[in-house]
Image (cartoon, rainbow, N blue to C red):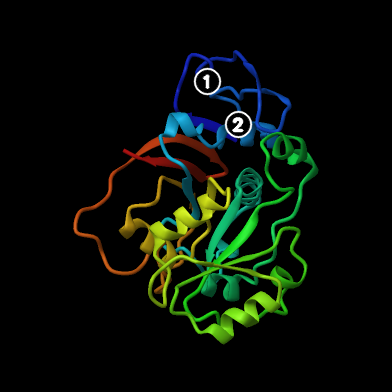
Amino acid sequence: MRRLFPVTDETSTDERVTARTATGERAVAPDHGGDREWSLAELATAYAYPEAAASGRSAWLRANMVSTLDGAAQHEGRSQPISSATDMRIFGTLRALADVVVVGAETVRQEEYRPARARAEFAGARKAAGQAPAAAIAVVTASLDLDYSLPLFTSPLVPTLVLTGAAAAPDRIATAEKAGARVVIAGDGVGVDPARAVQALAALGHTRLLTEGGPRLLGQMVAAGVLDELCLSLSPMLTAGDAQRIAGGPSIAVPRRFELVSLLEEAGFLFSRYRRS
């Protein structure tokens, strides 16, 4: 992997810089021209959440998505066929940095979601930051029509959260709670209000938020103006067909502007980070 942006004195020469990383290790910053596998410590540094004081926000919501060259976020309903080994290492690193992973119910069904796992490489840093051993998974659902026999509910390291609206069916809320999930109300109606969801999660102490979609949920977050950062992996593949884009739903009146803050490359895959301007 090599860094394409930002280009600094360190990345444009063969000089190397050591720094304390999010995993507590001493890491060596990769040079601009190098093409090698980055360590997890280097990835953690490259994708570190901003400090709360610097961001000016009580919680920071980032999205992690993958797209093909022709804009497909999935192939045959799943993202795995358009991903890569390095993309999955970044996927795992982003989960290891987050307090909670927010995901739509349909994505849970299609991707056969499992609970986040504890990783020894990040254990020390998570403990020092006051985080649980692994990120919690928060499922956004209006209907609460979920399969509670899945490992996401039967064997999570951290109890799974279910985000729903105040008008959700009481019997389905009771079923979710009986299955061990923690139900969080984040909307006045049947569905979830993205802004309320961010506030509710922050109130539970989850300030480093990560969403992995799907496209409909991400579209709702974009429309609500609550997305702070997009980590987008651009896959060097073409799929054609009618697969969803990374964000779906109704268009917004004025496109939201984000700025590029980082760009990495490996084997034709581009790994970018954009933050709201």
The crowd level at tag 2 (other Cα within 10 Å; few <14, some 14-19, many 20+) is some
Quadrant including the C terminus:
top left
- The answer to whether 82 is drawn above or below residue 244 in the figure is above
Please tell me which of labels 2 and 1 falls first in the chain. Answer: 1
Quarter occupied by residue 241 = bottom left
Q: Amino acid at mark 2?
A: Thr
Q: Is residue 264 visible?
A: yes
Identity of the amino acid at label 1? Thr
Q: Position of residue 266 (x, y in %)?
A: 57, 41
Figure label count: 2
Q: Residue at x 53, y 37 (%)?
A: 49
Q: Could you say which is closer to the camera, residue 156 or residue 239?
A: 156
Residue 109 is left or right of residue 71, and the answer is right
Residue name at image x 64 percent, y 82 percent: 175
Q: Which mark is residue 45?
A: 2
Measure how far apart labels 2 and 1 are at the Cα level. Answer: 15 Å
Q: Which mark is residue 11?
A: 1
From the top left corner, tell me how far across and down residue 123 is, in percent: 76, 40
Please give left or right for residue 252 compared with residue 221 in the image. left
Asked if residue 232 shows in the view, the reply is no
Of labels 2 and 1, the one closer to you: 2
- 229 up-or-down from 186: above or below: above
For the point 48% across and 80% down, the residue is: 168
**Which of the image's four quarters has the N terminus?**
top right
Q: Return the residue found at the far left.
A: 253
Residue farthest toward the right in the current orientation of the protein? 120
| Residue 45 sits in quarter | top right
The quadrant holding residue 245 is bottom left
